[in-house]
Amino acid sequence: MKKSIIALALLATLPAFALAKKPTKAAEPAPAAAAPVVEEAEPTITEECVINVSLFNESVKNKQYADAWDPWWQVYTTCPNANKAIYTRGDELVEWKISQTQDQKEYEELRQLLLTLHDKRIKYFGNDPKYPAAYVLGLKGVDYCNFFKEDPLKEPAYEWLKQSIEGMGNKSQIQVLKQFADLSNARYKSDPEKYATAYISDYQTVTMILAAQAADPQNKNAARAQENKDYVDQMFASSGAANCEKLDEIFGPIVNDNLSNLDMLNKIMAMFRRVKCTESEIYFAAAAASHTLEPTEESAAGCAKMCMKKGDYKEAVTYYEQAIELSPEDDKEDRSEYLFNIAYIYFDKIKSYQLSRNYLRRSLELMANQGRCYILMGMLYAASQPYGEGIAPAKAAILNKTVFWAAVDKFQKAKMVDPDVAEDANKLISSYSKYFPTKEEIFDLPELQDGASFTVGGWIQETTTCRAAKQ
């Protein structure tokens, strides 16, 4: 009596249509020579099925796998459409069973059962809006990789994982994305010529999804997505497929065939940038075509690099200015990078030192701990001779040595804000300190007395401390 009460209570929680056997549709009249078409009926969900679902579900929740096995097996074999828990709990239960067996034949049967489990879930619950067939294919692919390790390339799993990612998009599971990247890498290593193009395409797909997940503030797994993206990036970078010449060979024709396809051009540019192939002619071609269609920060920066390589420095500055305008205001890292690049062009190529310093100061306003900016500013000062006109040549020669005080001050500042540049800064300090005015020269100009405050003239206008070169 007690069992019947429990059964009735459980049955009450299920929709009426789930308990009734669905009628078989009448077949269309078949041609004379053809066999009659019979549609397979849905398995009947009995009272016993409902009870067994409850029994195994609770047991698995409590990690009581031995108790769960028999009721689960009864449901799985007699009414596999009764409840999605047959599969969500069944995956865990079968894996436990695999871990317990010492018999090779049973192990083989169980791992095949694990794959069939996913197929049945797709058959009966493949239309689930949250966990559709594509999601289940991802689980199937991961399980194949875990339990069929003797298969080196795991081609079946590769296809299942690929279909899962195509179906789930940015909602793909992180474990599916990582496993797919691992398999694609293994395929590439087995035959680089055969699998290079597919591997590069797979890498793009995986990293774009992981990047989107990592950038989603609502995603509780954002940090794990970023960790896996870093892993996949590193794997790709060390694979050999990231060779710039190889990428040029593969993507050259693709760029030429897609000069009007903005989405494809942007994806190719992102790929080249991730693997640090931004000096490539193919990257430049993609950037130029993309910029013509719709100017973006990425395309403007690409065109700037192209102009730098061709020696068109003023045009490079123009493109970097566009990149700054097109970049988000809160993207301080990229904006400071573009400003630094402009500063370097004005220093090294155009020789406009004051303009160079202006851009360095703007870059430092965005990111104050850039030692490179202070080093470049010091080099600007060291390369300058602000004194000359209207001053006796001998005196101007001494005063022009004061720029090295200002330069060394900047090198000192560089290593203070950024320990990563300390080694370079120390070398520059050692080199340029030798050019300080000597004691004799300071003696001839009382305003340069050792320890006194002095403002370097001309465009520099930096206040520094006088000190003599060490003898």
Image (spheres, rainbow, N blue to C red):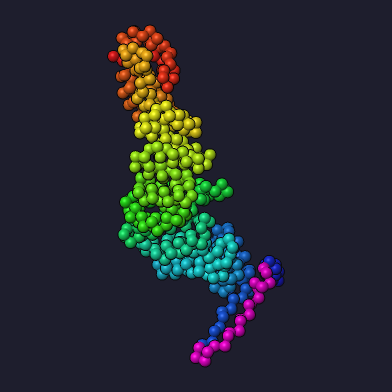
Give the residue at the far bottom of this rendering: 32
Name the residue: 54% across, 70% down.
123
For the point 45% across and 66% down, which residue is it? 111
Q: Is residue 350 visible?
A: yes
Majority secondary structure of magenta residues: loop
Residue segment shown in magenta: 14-34
In this picture, is 466 found above or below 192?
Answer: above
Outermost residue on the front side: it is 390
In which quarter of the view is residue 381 placed? Answer: top left
Task: Locate residue 251, reporting x and y percent.
Answer: 37, 55
Task: From the top left corner, tell me how far across and down residue 1 is, in percent.
Answer: 70, 71
* Residue 402: in magenta span: no
Does 139 sit left or right of 279 as displayed? right
Q: Is residue 317 above or below residue 165?
A: above
Quadrant where the C terminus sits is top left
Residues 8 and 206: in front is 206
- Image x and y of residue 5, in percent: 71, 69
Residue at point 55% right, 58% down?
A: 63
Give the residue drawn at x 38%, y 11%.
Answer: 448
